[in-house]
Amino acid sequence: MVKNDIPDNVAKVFAEAMGDKNLFLQFLESFPYLVQIFAPDGTSVYTNQVGNDAMNVADASEVVGKYNVLLDPVVNDVLGLREDLVRAFKGEKMIATNVRVPFEDLSKRYTQKNENFDQVLYEQIYSSPLYDKNGKIQFIAMVFQTTNTYNEKAEIVRAKGYMNENWQQSYDINKIAKIGGYSSKYFIGLFKKHTRQTPYEYYKHIKIERIKQELVNPEISISEAFNRCDVEYSSTYRRIFKEITGMTPLEYKKSKNKK
């Protein structure tokens, strides 16, 4: 997106804050990190060129005015950002850490700038509301800072995509390895070499993130939260939950439902 494509109403808010519309437009386009701006309903209204390049998106017009982050099941559920986004769009400043960019999903949605793109990025996301002179939220601005970059084999990306999309199914390493085109024994070693964790460890993290989302709901019990994620509330998964989060399910639920 070129700098003159930023909507006038967005630029007006910036101009009120900085006093010079063109100067701020130049700043956004030259900023070294991905910048995305959303309307209060979650619709994307701006993304800078650095962001398009980082996301391997060839045409920003496929995103701006069409993409809605609040309606994106991958961002909200697979990446586990639903709670953070609710807070951000209510006006809270928010920081989300170690967020994996879901390139396997982006490649299905948007025209790719580089068909041979094989990087894996992890981002730290900073979100802040933008107010007009009357103190009303006009936009939500998000800045994405890359914290880790990996070049990952396509087989690993496909396997991760499968586990993210089929997290409710029981773990089946034979099926996952077949997607990569390898035997289960070889694929476990390959996966760990590229991701520093086994496929099962990756799968467990997906499950726990889903359970965490359910535990936030004050209307359901802990066991029901686990059942909704097709997991039996057992000593095994209580131990796994604590290993990953540092808290027991009960401690986590209490921390998220404080009055």
Image (cartoon, helix red, strand yellow):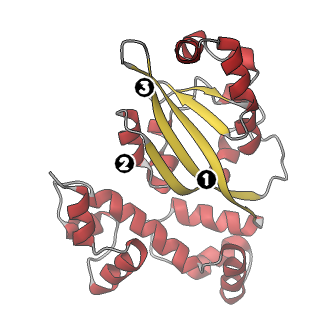
Q: Decide: few, some or many residues near mark 1? Use Cα within 10 Å; few <14, some 14-19, many ≥20.
A: some
Gap between marks 2 and 3, in whole Å? 16 Å
Looking at the picture, which amino acid does disc 3 mark?
Answer: Pro
Q: Is residue 89 left or right of residue 188?
A: left
Residue 252 vertical placement versus 125 (above, below): below
> Looking at the image, can residue 111 be seen?
no
Quadrant containing the N terminus is top right
Label annotation for residue 123: 1
> Looking at the image, can residue 211 be seen?
yes
Q: Is residue 98 left or right of residue 151?
A: left
- Determine the secondary structure under disc 1: strand
Label annotation for residue 40: 3
Q: Is residue 98 left or right of residue 186?
A: left
- Determine the secondary structure under disc 3: loop
Residue 27 vertical placement versus 105 (above, below): above
Q: Which residue is mark 2?
A: 83
